[in-house]
């Protein structure tokens, strides 16, 4: 029998193009966490663009006769999307109109607002992310922020100390307040086995309602005692502004960056951080190795509370001058999304905090200049986390290959990596 040789065109030529190379590249991109995260952001912005178009009155009016003149609807939608995202950028990064004035506030105003919004989000995200690394879910950011802001604010307006000393003491008071509030949840977990999700949520209610009571007490409440607002913090206890009194960005930003570096060092260079990561990865193996899991729970929640307390400090000593019932500004829960987007890593949390700070600052400008509801920005934030938690969906949308790891596995790898 005569053998038939395979066609030479079916075999890859030596040194020629590899037909499997595109598949390998798509698989490598699909397995790249950074690429998937960026594509999740792109997908969220696309969905946000659709929502902006639907919320635009001109686009809705043109859609009534879409089949007779479809370009009118498409032009109106494109104009609304362009104006909305342009306003978002101008409110978060750079506004040519105000920059043309040549003043510091005009040039750096948008960046200042982004950094002001990002500062407590970074600290709150670090708090949630650190607890994640030890296998705990800290939903008590709101209560810990309120506790920290209350303690720092009280020292700020009730005590009268020299410059610098007053600020340092107020910062320490806020850290102690938040730390004790977090440590209480950790202690309950360690001693009684009470689930930290339940205890932290309940402690949120306790802190918020305790603050509501204090805002009705003379000595804490501002005269003439007609509104739920505290006395004004002394100037000696205020965080200094970084770009002059006309811009709100303050030294709280440095506190957030220092805290991020400290958490990075703690988790990667210290014995205590190794214990936290070991407990988070497998508490039974950690206990077999001689580590005290219960003590780790208390310690990690103490540090997490300190971080959230610092977020409260930046709120009352940096952004606001008096304590009100909404001093937490929803940061405690937004910090959970920041930690998820940052994958519980210090560097990732900083970047996620900056992104969400930009969305917060730009959303205000977008609403005021274009009339686009600021809720669209909240939807975009939620969609970013949704796509991050579902990497398989992102790969499907962008036709990437990957290992096929589930959302939970992907996040766990990011948290414990």
Image (tube, rainbow, N blue to C red):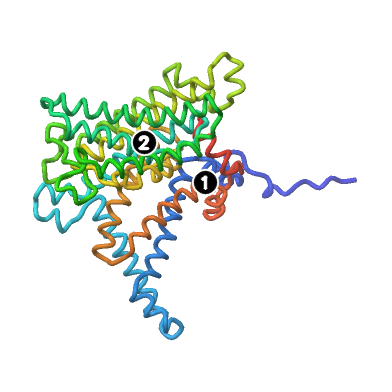
Tell me where residue 77 sits by quadrant: bottom left
Q: Quadrant of the N terminus?
A: top right
Looking at the image, which residue is at 52% across and 54% down? 398
Image location of residue 86, percent across then percent down: 28, 60
* Residue 1 higher or lower than 350, as above or below: below
Looking at the image, which residue is at 27% across and 57% down? 364
Image location of residue 87, percent across then percent down: 26, 60
Looking at the image, which residue is at 43% across and 47% down? 38
User: Residue beneath label 1, please?
Assistant: 389
Looking at the image, which residue is at 39% across and 45% down? 334
Nearer-the-camera pick, 15 or 140: 140
User: Residue beneath label 2, please?
Assistant: 144
- In the shown orientation, is residue 33 left or right of residue 127? right
Residue 68's label in the rendered image is none
Mark in front: 2 vs 1: 2
* Residue 354 higher or lower than 287, as above or below: below
Image location of residue 145, percent across then percent down: 33, 38
Tell me where residue 234 sits by quadrant: top left
Nearer-the-camera pick, 113 or 239: 239
Sequence order check, earlier mark of 2 and 1? 2
- In the shown orientation, is residue 299 left or right of residue 222? right
Among all residues in the image, which is located at the extreme front? Answer: 218
């Amino acid at each position: 029998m005569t053998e038939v040789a395979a066609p030479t065109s079916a075999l890859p030529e030596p040194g020629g193009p590899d037909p499997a190379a595109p598949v390998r590249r798509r698989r490598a991109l699909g397995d790249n966490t950074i690429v998937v995260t960026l594509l999740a952001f792109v997908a969220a912005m696309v969905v946000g663009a659709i929502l902006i178009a639907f919320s635009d009155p001109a686009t809705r009016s043109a859609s009534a006769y879409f089949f007779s003149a479809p370009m009118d609807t498409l032009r109106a939608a494109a104009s609304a999307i362009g104006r909305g995202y342009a306003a978002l950028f101008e409110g978060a990064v750079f506004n040519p109109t105000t920059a043309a004035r040549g003043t510091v506030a005009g040039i750096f105003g948008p960046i200042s607002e982004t950094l002001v919004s990002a500062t407590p989000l970074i600290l709150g995200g670090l708090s949630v992310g650190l607890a994640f690394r030890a296998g705990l879910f800290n939903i008590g950011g709101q209560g810990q922020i309120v506790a920290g802001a209350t303690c720092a604010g009280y020292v700020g307006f009730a005590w009268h100390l020299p410059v610098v000393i007053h600020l340092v003491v107020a910062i320490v008071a806020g850290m102690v307040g938040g730390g004790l509030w977090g440590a209480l949840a950790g202690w309950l977990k360690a001693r009684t086995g009470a689930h930290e999700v339940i205890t932290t949520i309940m402690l949120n209610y306790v802190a918020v309602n305790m603050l509501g009571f204090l805002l009705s007490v003379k000595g804490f409440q501002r005269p003439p005692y007609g509104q739920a607002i505290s006395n004004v913090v002394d100037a000696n206890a205020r965080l200094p502004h970084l770009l002059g009194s006309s811009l709100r960005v303050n030294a709280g930003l440095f506190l957030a960056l220092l805290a991020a570096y400290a958490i990075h060092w703690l988790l990667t260079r210290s014995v205590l951080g190794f214990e936290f990561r070991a407990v988070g990865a497998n508490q039974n193996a950690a206990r077999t190795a001689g580590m005290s899991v219960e003590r780790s729970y208390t310690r990690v929640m103490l540090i997490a509370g300190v971080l959230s307390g610092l977020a409260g400090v930046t709120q009352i000593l940096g952004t606001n001058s008096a304590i009100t019932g909404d001093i937490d500004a929803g940061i405690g829960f937004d910090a959970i999304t920041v930690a998820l987007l940052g994958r519980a890593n210090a560097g990732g949390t900083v970047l996620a905090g900056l992104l969400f700070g930009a969305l917060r600052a730009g959303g205000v400008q977008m609403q005021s200049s274009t009339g686009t509801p600021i809720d669209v920005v909240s939807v975009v934030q939620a969609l970013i986390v949704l796509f991050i938690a579902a990497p398989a969906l992102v790969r499907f949308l962008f036709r990437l290959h990957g290992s096929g790891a589930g959302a939970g596995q992907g996040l766990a790898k990011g948290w414990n990596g």
